[in-house]
Image (cartoon, helix red, strand yellow):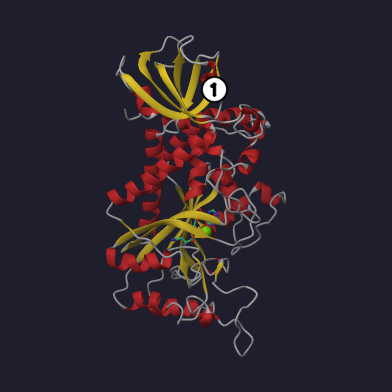
């Protein structure tokens, strides 16, 4: 008989019928009650062993962490806490879990710190917290695809290995096939990349944007959703060296259209999670309430997790120009009292996360879209405004997260784009293909990148980005 997923069994109304489940033992009480979780839901199914039906040799092997198959009959539960349970008539141990060894791992039934769970990232998905996070993460991915597919966007897979550093921030990981102790050199003493695998210098992508732009010029509206890599040495709770980014790119769309798209998109996926991940959200919400109890009052969340998601859904994102934001920051209490690590003195300053969080959490108290940034602090491809100083950039800032989206209207004018590249010493030969799109049927177009893990952070209420991706890559850490 084919086995069923616990999530199906818990909803099933096929009482008194045979049922088989396979999963891992979460607990075994009084030599009678096994709680089995199979990952399909946060909940366990209770399997009840009738007295004396099973050998002690078998029941001794029903230990926390063991993999088991249970066959039996689905019955109404006599106990409280569950609607149905399985009256077991056969149990197979698929894989034992030695209690002595298990005791030393995070699977032992007691409270472990998130840091300890990170050290055993291969086991943490078997805890309630990580099961819930990873199910939500999966559903969020699906919601993202659903949103774009429903709205006539095409999914494009941009290259992971590339010759361009789209953001121009010099944070790309190099890709080479050279033996590192025998790197060929040119006559001038430089590295001879013509002898490398690709015959040129290459790196891991920092963004699929430039390639996505070329595809938007044919398919109209596209999105990428893939891994991106940044060798920035930021050891923070918001940065990963390998993270997933969602990047839509839309032809015939200006910055206002881009902001509308981003807001609509984010609200859609949040609504999807509220509708489809109720059990996991409820668990994560309670987890946060527990966690908050150990924090000083001032650091506690003002809203419950689901209320926070609903709040974002029910309010318009506040759209504020960079210039207005600088005025607000300049005159803000923390700036006047010298509480910012980076004081805001003048227009043109790059905003740090302390500023972004002040704007979102203290001043506006809702998601904020900042737009029209100084050209000097933004990438070369952003469209220059008539003032000659600012570009049609936008960043979306979220409470507790800071920047979650970065995007812009793109510079579609060939001459202006070339001037900007020249000013930043970006050789035209390197981006000849990108410039071609401005030669043949160029048009107003826009796009943005949403950091997927930052979205998962927001939705799950977790506070460290290392806890929302299965195997985080950060400076000095690439275990597993
Ligand atoms: O603002 P960024 O650098 O923008 C771009 O890469 C554009 N090319 C996107 C586009 O217009 N198509 O990155 C976009 C988002 C950020 O807002 C942030 O959410 C996330 O990617 N991000 C990171 N997330 C985790 N770890 C990091 N190191 C990140 N760097 C950026
Ligand atoms: Mg950015």
Q: Observer-nearest residue: 158 or 20?
A: 20
Tally the marks.
1
**Residue that numbered label 1 is attached to:** 27
In the displayed structure image, the side of residue 463 where residue 277 appears, left or right: left
Q: Position of residue 323 (x, y in %)?
A: 53, 59
Residue 170 lies, with reference to residue 131, above or below; the image says below
Which of these two is toward me, 230 or 59?
59
Please tell me which residue lies in front, 362 or 11: 11
* Mark 1 lies within 8 Å of ligand 1 (Cβ measured): no
From the top left corner, tell me how far across and down residue 284 is, in percent.
Answer: 52, 32
**Rendered view: 378 above or below 365:** below
Q: Residues within 10 Å of mark 1 (few under 14, many from 20)?
A: some
Give the quadrant of residue 217.
Answer: bottom left
In the rendered image, the quadrant that contains the N terminus is top left
In the picture provided, is 114 more to the left or to the right than 39? Answer: right
The spot of residue 115 in percent (x, y) is 65, 40
**Visible residue check, residue 366:** no
Q: Residue at x 34, y 74 (%)?
A: 437
Residue that lies at the very extreme toward the bottom in this rendered image = 187
Residue at screen point 49% across, 75% down: 197
The answer to whether residue 129 is above or below residue 444 is: above
Which structural element holds mark 1?
strand
Compared across the picture, whether 370 is left or right of 181 comes to left
Residue 325 location (% of width, % of height): 55, 54
Asked whether 331 or 22 is in front, the reply is 22
Is residue 380 visible to the viewer in this orientation of the structure? yes
């Amino acid at each position: 008989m084919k086995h069923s997923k616990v999530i199906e069994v818990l909803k099933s109304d096929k009482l008194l019928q045979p049922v088989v489940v396979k999963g891992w033992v979460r607990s075994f009480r009084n030599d009678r009650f096994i709680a089995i979780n199979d990952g399909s839901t946060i909940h366990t199914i209770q399997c009840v062993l009738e007295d004396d039906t099973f050998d002690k040799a078998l029941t001794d092997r029903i230990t926390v962490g063991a993999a088991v198959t249970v066959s039996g009959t689905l019955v109404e539960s006599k106990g409280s806490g569950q609607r149905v349970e399985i009256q077991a008539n056969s149990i197979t141990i698929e894989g034992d879990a030695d209690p002595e060894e298990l005791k030393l791992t995070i699977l032992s039934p007691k409270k472990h710190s998130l840091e300890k769970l990170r050290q055993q990232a291969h086991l943490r998905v078997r805890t309630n917290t990580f099961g819930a996070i990873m199910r939500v993460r999966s559903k969020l991915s699906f919601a993202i695809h659903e949103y774009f597919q429903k709205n006539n966007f095409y999914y494009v897979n941009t290259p992971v290995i590339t010759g361009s550093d789209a953001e121009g921030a010099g944070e790309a990981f190099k890709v080479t096939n050279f033996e590192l102790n025998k790197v060929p050199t040119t006559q001038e003493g430089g590295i001879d990349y013509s002898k490398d695998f690709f015959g040129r210098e290459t790196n891991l992508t920092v963004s699929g944007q430039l390639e996505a732009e070329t595809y938007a010029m044919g398919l109209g509206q596209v999105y990428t959703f893939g891994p991106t890599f940044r060798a920035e040495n930021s050891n923070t709770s918001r940065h990963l060296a390998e993270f997933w980014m969602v990047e839509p790119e839309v032809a015939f769309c200006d910055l206002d259209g881009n902001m509308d798209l981003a807001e609509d998109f984010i609200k859609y996926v949040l609504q999807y999670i509220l509708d489809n991940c109720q059990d996991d959200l409820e668990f994560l919400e309670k987890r946060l309430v527990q966690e908050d109890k150990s924090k000083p009052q001032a650091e506690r969340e003002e809203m419950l997790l689901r209320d926070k998601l609903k709040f974002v859904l029910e309010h318009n994102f506040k759209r504020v120009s960079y210039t207005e934001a600088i005025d607000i920051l300049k005159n803000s209490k923390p700036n006047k009292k010298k509480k910012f690590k980076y004081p805001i003195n003048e227009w043109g300053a790059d905003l740090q996360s302390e500023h972004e969080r002040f704007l979102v959490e203290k001043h506006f108290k809702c998601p904020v879209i900042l737009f029209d940034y100084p050209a000097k602090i933004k990438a070369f491809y952003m469209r220059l405004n008539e003032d000659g100083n600012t570009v049609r950039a936008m960043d979306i800032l979220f409470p507790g997260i800071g920047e979650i989206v970065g995007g812009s209207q793109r510079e579609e004018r060939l001459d202006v784009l070339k001037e900007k590249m020249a000013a930043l010493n970006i050789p035209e030969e390197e981006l000849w293909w990108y410039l071609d799109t401005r030669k043949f049927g160029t048009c107003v177009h826009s796009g943005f990148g949403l950091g997927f893990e930052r979205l998962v952070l927001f939705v799950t209420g977790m506070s460290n980005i290392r806890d929302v991706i299965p195997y985080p890559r950060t400076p000095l850490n690439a275990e597993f």
